[in-house]
Image: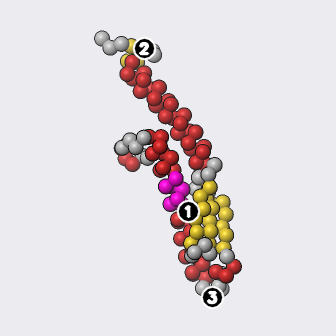
Amino acid sequence: MAKRNFGGIPGNMNSLLKQAQKMQKEMEKMQQELEEKDVTATAGGGAVEVVFTGKKELKSITIKPEVVDPDDVEMLQDLILAAVNEGLRQVDELANQQMSKLTGGLNLPGGLF
């Protein structure tokens, strides 16, 4: 008969439960740390700069005056899109790096992390 403790849960299940609870606390801490970080991305050699929070919230956009050309608004729009997309990509990359530290490179199903 299997050794039982923790309300009838076998010992190895008890250990797994404790590990899952520890991982959950670490994930919450990591999520909070991620939310406190900022990511900066640029386009057009720095003509457009965006800053995102770790929560993927756009915090600021800086546009150099020399890139503002009323006859070429499309170029400015493209630069803004490029900077925003790069910023979002960097936030995702940062989140994936943080999660990899926590999971220890586990190959979890469904691309969860």
Q: Residue at x 62, y 51 (%)?
A: 37
Q: Main secondary structure of the magenta part?
A: helix
Label 3 is placed on what type of residue? Answer: Asp
Q: Is any atom of residue 81 visible in this view?
A: no
Local packing at callout 2 (Cα closer than 10 Å; few below 14, some 14-19, many 20+) is few
Q: Residue furthest right?
A: 65
Numbered mark located on residue 5 in the image: 2
Which secondary structure lies at badge 1?
helix
Q: Residue at x 60, y 43 (%)?
A: 32
Q: Is residue 105 visible?
A: yes
Q: Position of residue 93 (x, y in %)?
A: 49, 55
Measured along the vertical axis of the image, is residue 67 above or below residue 106?
below
Q: Which residue is mark 1?
A: 87
Instruction: Give the percent coordinates (x, y) of residue 55.
Output: 59, 52
The residue lying at 56 percent from left, 72 percent from top is 43
97 in relation to 40, above or below: above
Q: Give above or below for 2 relative to 50.
A: above
Q: Amino acid at mark 2?
A: Asn
Q: Earlier in the sequence, mark 2 or mark 3?
A: 2
First along the sequence among labels 3 and 1:
3
**How much space separates mark 3 and mark 1, taking CA atoms?**
27 Å
Disc 3 on helix, strand or loop? loop
Q: Which mark is residue 71?
A: 3
**Magenta span covers which residues?**
88-94
Amino acid type shown at disc 1: Gly
What is the distance, in whole Å, between disc 2 and disc 1 at their CAs?
Answer: 49 Å
